[in-house]
């Protein structure tokens, strides 16, 4: 019997074994994992399970150092883990912050940030497109969109880098010392003391009523933390993959430079081919027959986004990176259904602009021999990209 461990730390170093995933899709599409979960590998199954939120409930407990959400007080549940109808009501507050209108207004800031970072790379060769570009952009943009000083980005990157952003106050050994909560609590207190506070995400969360009640401070802090958790290192993964591919494929770099209209397609194909979130976990709320198997209440099910995005039933030649796919946005990189990523427009903007600015500013990009990017933490299973880059204007 085949098995697959989507949490295996080797994938961070060696890359995800896509040939093994292809075998799993063909021979054992619902595949057991060493921890007793089952990994869904086919596009149709992953999409159906993501949409069926009444049966498959998100559980990020293991990522935050716990056994599961049963160990988490309700106030510390992340947006992904909250059931309807409460989920939809809190999610509206996220949409108000990250919806298309708000995101369009962010384009200039993203572009200026990218140019400023390229200035620094050029001034201090050899430039490192990971540490000096893909890593800082998402934190700086998140801080800006939240109305915070740029220094906030330093915290966001540090918490995302060492995994603290995944922990919660209820994680063993954390408690009141949970730094993201303490930091956001100070910001919230300052906003409340401000006689003329800006109309931003803090005001929206603090002023909201859900089911007739205001959110508690712990709930507000939990959702603020989750925005950073969900939006910073995911986007870093996308920008890293985009930059890495521009370095690895000079012909593609030249093609995009020649035809800028292809850049959004390039971003979509990267999201499909190198999904920054390679898997996400669910648990069954009740016993169910699904994809020909029986699942009991509380069984763990892994949504194999990485595998679904390479499913030959949906994509011709799925391991190839191609800009001529008929439906470039038809991938599950942002999930599906009621919990589909509300930050997708922002991630796409950052991806597109970060590539456009590199095409504007660089004639070519050269890898430094032997240099590698560090693996992205968070157990999401990114394939690393071997290159530190020399900027060549
Ligand atoms: C390339 C970058 C990104 C990728 C690949 C990504 C991927 C995902 C995926 C797969 C989900 C669904 C998770 C699940 O159903 O278990 C999700 C949800 C979410 N994402 Fe993103 N995301 C990205 C960027 C962002 C950004 C920039 C933000 C915030 C600004 C964000 C905020 C969220 C939130 C709050 C949720 C939970 C939504 C809900 O449960 O209703 N993401 N994302």
Image (cartoon, grey):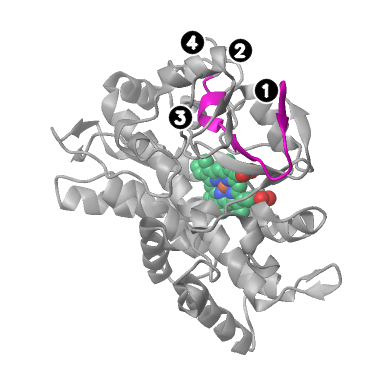
**Residue indicated by mark 1:** 44
Front position among marks 2 and 4: 2
307 part of magenta stretch = yes
Labels 3 and 2: the sequence-earlier one: 3
- Crowding around mark 4 (Cα neighbors within 10 Å: few <14, some 14 to 19, many 20+) is few
Return the residue nearer the eye: 134 or 31.
Answer: 31
Label 4 and label 1: CA atoms lie apart by 18 Å
Determine which quarter of the picture holds residue 330: top right
User: Would residue 309 appear left or right of 160 to someone viewing this image?
Assistant: right
**Disc 4 secondary structure class:** loop
Does 51 appear above or below 376?
above
**Disc 2 secondary structure class:** loop
Residue 261 placement (x, y as % from top left): 49, 26
Residue sitting at x 20%, y 48%: 122
Return the residue nearer the eye: 302 or 84.
Answer: 302
Label 3 and label 4: CA atoms lie apart by 15 Å
Can you tell me whether the CB of the residue at mark 1 lies under 8 Å from the nearest atom of ligand 1?
A: no
Residue 34 placement (x, y as % from top left): 48, 35
**Residue indicated by mark 2:** 313
Front position among marks 4 and 1: 1
Can you tell me whether the CB of the residue at mark 2 lies under 8 Å from the nearest atom of ligand 1?
A: no
- Crowding around mark 1 (Cα neighbors within 10 Å: few <14, some 14 to 19, many 20+) is some
Labels 4 and 1: the sequence-earlier one: 1
**Residue indicated by mark 4:** 317
User: Would residue 77 appear left or right of 109 to someone viewing this image?
Assistant: right
User: Would residue 71 appear left or right of 359 to someone viewing this image?
Assistant: right
In contact (CB < 8 Å): disc 3 and disc 4: no
- Crowding around mark 3 (Cα neighbors within 10 Å: few <14, some 14 to 19, many 20+) is many
Label 3 and label 1: CA atoms lie apart by 20 Å
Q: Which residues are magenta?
A: 292-310
369 part of magenta stretch = no
**Residue indicated by mark 3:** 270
């Amino acid at each position: 019997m085949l098995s697959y461990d989507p949490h295996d730390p080797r994938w961070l170093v060696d890359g995800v074994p896509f040939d093994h995933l292809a075998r799993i899709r063909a021979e054992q599409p619902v595949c057991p994992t060493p921890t007793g979960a089952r990994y869904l590998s086919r596009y149709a199954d992953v999409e159906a399970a993501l949409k069926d939120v009444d049966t498959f409930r998100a559980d990020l407990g293991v990522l935050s150092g716990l056994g599961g959400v049963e160990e988490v007080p309700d106030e510390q549940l992340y947006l992904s883990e909250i059931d309807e109808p409460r989920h939809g009501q809190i999610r509206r507050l996220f949409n108000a912050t990250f919806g298309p209108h708000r995101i369009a207004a962010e384009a200039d800031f993203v572009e200026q940030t990218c140019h400023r970072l390229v200035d620094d790379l050029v001034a201090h060769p050899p430039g490192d497109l990971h540490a000096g570009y893909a890593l800082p952009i998402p934190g700086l943009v998140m801080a800006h969109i939240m109305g915070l000083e740029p220094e906030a980005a330093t915290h966001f990157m540090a918490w995302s880098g060492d995994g603290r952003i995944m922990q919660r106050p209820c994680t063993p050994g954390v408690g009141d010392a949970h730094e993201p909560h303490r930091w956001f609590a100070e910001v919230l207190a300052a906003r409340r003391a401000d006689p003329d506070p800006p109309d931003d995400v803090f005001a929206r969360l603090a002023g909201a009523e859900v089911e007739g009640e205001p959110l508690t401070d712990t709930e507000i802090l939990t959702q603020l933390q989750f925005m950073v958790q969900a939006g910073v290192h995911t986007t870093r993964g996308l920008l890293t993959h985009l930059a890495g591919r521009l370095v690895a494929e000079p012909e593609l770099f030249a093609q995009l430079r020649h035809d800028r209209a292809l850049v959004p397609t390039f971003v979509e194909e990267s999201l499909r081919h190198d999904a920054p979130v390679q898997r996400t976990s669910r648990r069954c709320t009740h016993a169910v027959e699904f994809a020909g198997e029986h699942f009991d209440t509380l069984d763990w099910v892994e949504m194999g986004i990485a595998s679904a995005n390479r499913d030959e039933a949906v994509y011709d030649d799925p391991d190839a990176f191609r800009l001529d796919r008929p439906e470039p946005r038809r991938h599950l990189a942002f999930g599906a259904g009621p919990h589909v990523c509300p930050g997708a427009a922002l991630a796409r903007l950052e991806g597109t602009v970060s590539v456009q600015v590199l095409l504007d500013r660089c004639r070519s990009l050269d890898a430094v021999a032997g240099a590698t990017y560090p693996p992205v933490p968070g157990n999401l299973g990114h394939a690393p990209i071997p290159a530190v880059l020399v900027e060549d204007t």
